[in-house]
Every structure is written in C-alpha cells, then in structure tokens.
C-alpha cells in the first residue's frame, strides 16, 4: 500500500454533508503512465497522440450501453429525490398538525373555549408544504418511468436492436439532464423550506431536517452541475427545432417515440403563426385559457398539460430566435451568442422538466387506473393523487407566472381565477395531507426526527433529545453545569470583580449580590 515516487493521495477533508462518502485526491508529479494502461475499448489514442473512436459492430452498440449506464446514475438521483423530499414533507406536515398556534373564533374545544388552529390550517403553511408533498409523488412516478425506459433501451442495445438511434439516445440524455437539474434543485430548496416551516424547532439537529438537507445537497453538484446541464438539454431540443424548420418529415418521425414528441405540434403551429422567427418580441402561444375562464378550466389536468406544452415550445423558440438574432444582427461570435442565451436556455430547460414531471405523474395514475383491482391504488387514492397533480400544476404556474403571461397562455385578468382554483384544491387536499405522508411508510428510525414521530408525541421527544446532548449529560454527571468550577463559581461565591489569578489573591471587588 506504499505510494510510488511522485504520487500523493489523501482525503479532500470535511464536507458540508454526505461525509459517509469518501472523496479523495491524487496528485502525480513527473509520473509517466504507459499508454497500454489506458482503457481503449471504445476509443483509442495511438503513439502519435491521435484520438479515434472504435466504429462498427458490437463495439459501437456497447459504447451506447456505456453511455446509457452513465445516464442511469442521473436517473437514480432523480428517483431517490422523491424519498428525500417526501421525508422532509412527512416531518414538516406531521409537526404542523401537532403544533397549534392562534385561536379559532369559529370553533370551540371540549371546554367550550376557542380552539387553537393547527399550523397546517393556515394558508401560508399549506402553500409551503402541500405542493412539495405533491411534487414528491410526481418525482416518484417520473423516476420510475425514466429508469424503466433506460432499462428497455439497454436491453435493446445488448440484443442488437437497430431501433435505438442517436435521436433516441440524445432524447433520454436531454430528459435526464433536464430532470436532474430541476428536480435536485427543487428538492434541495424544498427540504430547506420544510425546515423553515417548522419554526425554531426546525433549527434543531433533532428535527432530522438539518442532516437530511446537508446530506442531500451534494445531489445538486454530482453527475453534472445544475447550472450547466440546461445547455445539454437545449442542444438536443434545438435539433428538433431545426428538423421542423427544414420540413424533413422522415427525420421528424425519429422524434415520435421520444419525450420531445409533445413539442412537435406546438412548434409547428407557432412557426406557422409567427412567420418572422427572427423578430424581437417573445413567441406567443397558439393556446390560451378562454376569456371567460372559470376555476374548472384551471382544475382540468388535460388543459394544464396543454398549457405546459405550449410554454416549453414558446420558450424554446425564443432561444432559437435569440441565437439567430445575435448571430445575424449584432455579428456576435457563436460563443458570445450562446453565452448571452444561457438564461433563456435555463428557463426552457425548466419548462421541459416541469412538463415531463406532470405528464409522467398523469400517465402513472392512468396506468394504475387501467390495472383495476390489480393496482395497489383504489379509486379514492387515485382521486387524492389526482388532486396532488392539479395542485402541482397550479403551484408551478403561480410560481412561474411570468412565463405564462409572456406567451399569452393566461392574462392578468385570469390570475385571480387561477389563485382561487389553487385555494380550492388546497382545501380539498388538506384532510388527506397526513395520510399521504403516512402512505410512504417511513419508519421513525429512518426519519431520525423528534418532530416527525409517527405517534405525534413531539414535545417529550424534543426534551429527550435535549437531555441526550453531551453538554447536558456531562453536566448531570458532575451535578453542576460545565464551566461552573472554572469560571462562574469565582463570580458567584467569592464576589464580583476583576479576577487576578490564584497567585494574586483571586477575585477582587465587592461581595456577590447573586
């Protein structure tokens, strides 16, 4: 295990969380590694330093399998995010039902006195927590779908199927990149929101939320930084825009079995209605909520999905417009034009991820319905999860309202209707909030939270956690608080004054008044 000369290794040091994972460094100083030690199954570097890919036969298929395997890591991160977010929601929602604050003048308790509100009954708390709970289920269905699709593609490649084209591989790369970027950011922020929703007790380590947050934060950086991945998404989506602009029907068929298929019809209608693709104004959607819209329009899953489809299409077309305008009008370099469009790319990538999450949530519920009695979900469960789906769609629309206003899907006059619909679905979902958390079946051992205990006995658990603190344990063992003998005793017993040290007579001054 001794290191060779010129080689230095070590641990990178303590991290903000996830410290059960070893991360190390390796430094080479004038160390030459023989070329034969390179892994060159799918690509080679010859003696002259020329790089070549190994083309043809099983090697080409195997290289795609290796690419799919790499994307599976992102898919596992996406899928595992549903549990991290659900655990945070379970802690915060359970605590919000136990914690009571403020008197309810409309309801009396058993003693005929005004009852106290459960914190979860406040609209602010519902708006903070219920959409996060709904998102955890959306991420579950989406993660399951992505992993299943990757597994099918890998099996087809291994069997030699030629139906797996570059378009299909590029599409799943785009999907996993968009989802990984958005889901991990949303989950990390959601866990922190759950912690804040627990007030001062959420700041305690015994809440379980501090460790959960610190452990999860690494997901935003590993396997592709979240701020960089949207570029990978847009590179793939722009190819679809190019195919539609060219009118190549044969090439367009390759996209029919991909996650990008939903963009074809909106993009075609947009290009027909916006002939000047290099114009200065933003793209306007060919779909919008009716002028006399009602709450029921915003509560329709199909209508919400259509709105999200057109949002992605418009924002993607705006990226295309911005790039083309920068290159033609300002004579900018391709690098500068791309850099200037990065913020627009991030918005388009986020829109793509949101649509996929809502669509897979909806498709997952439809699949469970089709199973009938074989499904683990009954009609009542599917109805509640459908409310979660609608809530999530309305919540994201409210959060990213500028996108929908910009493209004309909603008007400023329809915003109050949207928000009334949001209140209505939160009211419908409120009675099922705790049951939706309990359905995830997280054991107290796994939650490691005094606030999220299954039995709701929160405050004795907080006290017990405080008693286990090493400072309190050692103080109890000594019978007096730590630091008393060293510092406080001199002030309290011998009097208040300047401490001169033992050799100079200790404390000087007046007698203690304590």
Image: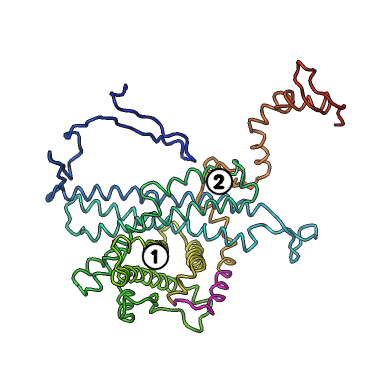
Q: Could you tell me which residue is drawn at 36 percent across and 34 percent down?
A: 25
Query: Circle 1 sits in a helix, a strand or a loop, which is it?
Result: helix
Query: Circle 2 sits in a helix, a strand or a loop, which is it?
Result: helix
Whether residue 131 sits left or right of residue 323 in the image: it is right
Q: Could you tell me which residue is drawn at 64 percent across and 54 percent down?
A: 97
Residue 49, located in which quarter of the rendered image? Answer: top left
Disc number placed over residue 232 in the picture, else none: none
Where residue 367 sits in the image (x, y, percent)? 38, 62
- Quarter of the picture containing the N terminus is top left
Residue beneath label 1, please?
Answer: 344
Q: Is residue 53 magenta?
A: no
In this view, 496 is above or below 42: above
Residue 5, located in which quarter of the rendered image? Answer: top left
Residue beneath label 2, please?
Answer: 209
Cα distance between the residues tagged 2 and 1: 33 Å
Q: Name which of mark 2 and mark 1 comes first in the sequence.
A: 2
Whether residue 116 sits left or right of residue 215 in the image: it is right
- Quarter of the picture containing the C terminus is top right
Where residue 451 sits in the image (x, y, percent)? 61, 46
Q: Which residues are magenta?
A: 408-424
Residue situated furthest bottom in the rendering: 292
């Amino acid at each position: 295990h001794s290191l060779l000369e010129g080689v230095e290794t070590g641990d990178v040091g303590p991290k903000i969380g996830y410290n059960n994972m070893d991360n190390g460094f390796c430094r080479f100083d004038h160390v030459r590694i023989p070329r034969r030690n390179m892994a060159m199954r799918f690509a080679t570097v010859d003696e002259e330093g020329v790089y070549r890919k190994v083309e043809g036969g099983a090697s080409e298929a195997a290289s795609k399998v290796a690419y799919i395997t790499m994307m599976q890591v992102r898919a596992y991160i996406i899928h595992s995010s549903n549990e991290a977010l659900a655990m945070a929601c379970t802690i915060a929602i359970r605590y919000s039902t136990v914690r009571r604050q403020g008197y309810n003048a409309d309801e009396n308790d058993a003693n005929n006195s005004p009852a106290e509100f459960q914190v979860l009954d406040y609209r602010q708390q519902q708006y903070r927590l219920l959409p996060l709970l709904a998102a955890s289920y959306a991420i579950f269905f989406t993660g399951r779908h992505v992993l299943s699709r990757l597994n099918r593609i890998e099996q087809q490649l291994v069997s030699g199927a030629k139906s797996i084209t570059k378009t299909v591989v590029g599409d799943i790369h785009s999907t996993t990149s968009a989802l990984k970027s958005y889901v991990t950011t949303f989950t990390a922020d959601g866990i922190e929101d759950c912690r804040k929703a627990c007030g001062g007790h959420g700041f305690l380590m015994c809440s379980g939320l501090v460790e959960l947050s610190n452990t999860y934060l690494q997901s935003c950086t590993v396997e592709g930084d979240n701020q960089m991945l949207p570029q990978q998404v847009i590179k793939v989506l722009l190819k679809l825009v190019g195919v539609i602009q060219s009118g190549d029907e044969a090439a367009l068929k390759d996209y029919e079995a991909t996650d990008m298929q939903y963009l074809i019809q909106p993009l075609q209608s947009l290009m027909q209605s916006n002939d000047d693709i290099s114009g200065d104004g933003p793209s306007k959607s060919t779909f919008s909520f009716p002028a006399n819209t009602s709450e029921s329009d915003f509560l329709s899953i199909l209508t919400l999905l259509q709105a999200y489809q057109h949002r992605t299409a418009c924002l993607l077309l705006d990226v295309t417009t911005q790039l083309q305008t920068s290159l033609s009008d300002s004579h900018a370099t391709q690098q500068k034009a791309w850099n200037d469009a990065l913020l627009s790319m991030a918005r388009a990538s986020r829109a793509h991820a949101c649509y996929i999450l809502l669509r897979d949530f909806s498709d997952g519920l439809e699949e469970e319905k089709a199973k009938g009695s074989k499904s683990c979900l009954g009609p009542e469960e599917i109805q509640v999860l459908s409310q979660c789906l609608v809530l999530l769609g309305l919540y994201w629309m409210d959060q990213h309202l500028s996108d929908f206003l910009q493209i004309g899907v909603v008007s400023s006059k329809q915003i109050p209707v949207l928000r009334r619909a949001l209140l209505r679905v939160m009211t419908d979902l409120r009675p099922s909030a705790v049951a939706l958390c309990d359905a995830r079946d997280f054991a107290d051992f796994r939650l490691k939270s005094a606030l999220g205990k299954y039995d709701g006995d929160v405050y004795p658990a907080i006290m017990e956690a405080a008693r286990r603190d090493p400072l309190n344990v050692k103080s109890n063992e000594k019978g007096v608080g730590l630091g008393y003998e060293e510092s406080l005793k001199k002030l309290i017993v011998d009097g208040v004054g300047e401490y001169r040290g033992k050799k100079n007579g200790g404390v000087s001054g007046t007698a203690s008044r304590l």
